[in-house]
Every structure is written in structure tokens, then in C-alpha cells.
Amino acid sequence: MAASVAHKFVERVDSNEDWHVLVEKTTGSLIVVDAHASWTGPCYALDRVLTSLFYEMGQEYDVKFLQAPSDRVAALADLKGTSRPTFLLFRNGVEVERVEGAIAPKLLHAIRRLAVKKGSAAGRLKADVTSALSYS
């Protein structure tokens, strides 16, 4: 199963099985995936930004952060061989947004817009609507 990385709130996806459990089978949560090639590693340029965001949102919002090497996860095959940072946002196993490049304001805006409060009926509705309207 996935091992934790530098930050305790970031989980690492190392296999298709990890991807299936942590992304495809997770419901309700906003999943933020830092997809990268194994040879480049994750996007450390936004480490502080994402750490601050995690602590800002605290336990109130249902957001999970993952790092996944595109050359080890079949679902990320379209990103294989690229060195550009790519952040994929998923809800209920469906990609709802993609941010290419280490563009902090764009990524923060997407996460804040798509994040839902834990346990709220409005949050569950937002999650369902977002998944239904997602671009594919």
C-alpha cells in the first residue's frame, strides 16, 4: 500500500492498486494528485503553498493530497515522459480539473473552489454536481 512521504498529509501512489484504492474508490473527498515522472520527482516548488493550504483548511474540508509517478500508474500514461508539473483533481474517481505547471494561484483557486466541508449536506451535493458536470 502507499507509503507516506515528506509531509504526513501527503500519500504516495506507487502502483495501480494504490491508484485504485486511493483515487478510483474514494468517494466525496477532493483528491489532489501531483502527477510526475519518476525521474523528475514531485513538484517541490509548491510544497510550502500546499502545506499552508492544508493547515488553512485544517480538518474542516475533505481534501486529500497524493503524489503519483506517471510511469508506474496506468491511469497516468498520457503524462508519461513529461517533465512539466501536473496536478489532477478528482472526486468520486472522476477527474474534475487539471492544472498544468507550477502555477500556485491557479491550483489554490481550483482546490478552494472544489473543496467541500466534511459531513455537510451542501458539501455532498457540491461533490455530486461537480462530478456530474466534470469535463472528461
Image: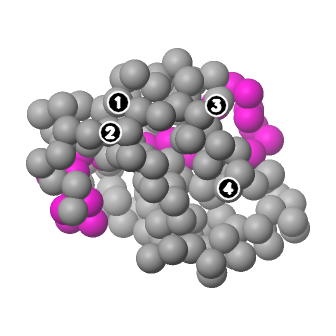
- The disc labelled 2 sits on which kind of residue? Pro
Asked whether the beta carbons under mark 2 and mark 4 sit within 8 Å of each other, the answer is no
Residue 46 location (% of width, % of height): 46, 25
- Residue 87 in percent (x, y) is at 42, 46
Work out how far the residue at label 2 is from the one at label 4, CA to CA, in angstroms: 20 Å
| Residue under numbered circle 2 | 85
Q: Among all residues in the image, which is located at the extreme top? A: 48
Give the farthest residue toward the bottom: 132
Q: Could you say which quadrant of the image residue 44 lies in?
A: top left
- Label 3 element class: helix
> From this viewpoint, which residue is outermost toward the right?
121
Find residue 125 and report its horizontal and vertical position in percent: 79, 72
Q: Is residue 63 visible?
A: no
Disc 2 or 4, which lies upstream in sequence?
2
* Marker disc for residue 114: 4
Q: Which mark is first along the chain, 4 or 1?
A: 1
Q: Residues within 10 Å of mark 2 (few under 14, many from 20)?
A: many
Amino acid type, callout 3: Phe
Pick whichever of labels 1 and 2 is earlier in the sequence: 1
SS at mark 4?
Answer: helix
Pair 3/2: label in front:
2
Residue type of the residue flagged with mark 4: Leu
Whether residues under marks 1 and 2 lie with C-beta atoms below 8 angstroms apart, the answer is yes
| Lower position in the chain sequence, tag 3 or tag 2 | 3
Relative side of 121 to 1, left or right = right
Question: Which secondary structure lies at badge 2?
Answer: loop
**Mark 1 — residue?**
43
Q: Is residue 29 above or below residue 13?
A: below
Q: Which residues are magenta?
A: 54-77
Instruction: Specify the color scheme.
Output: one colour
| Label 3 sits on residue | 54
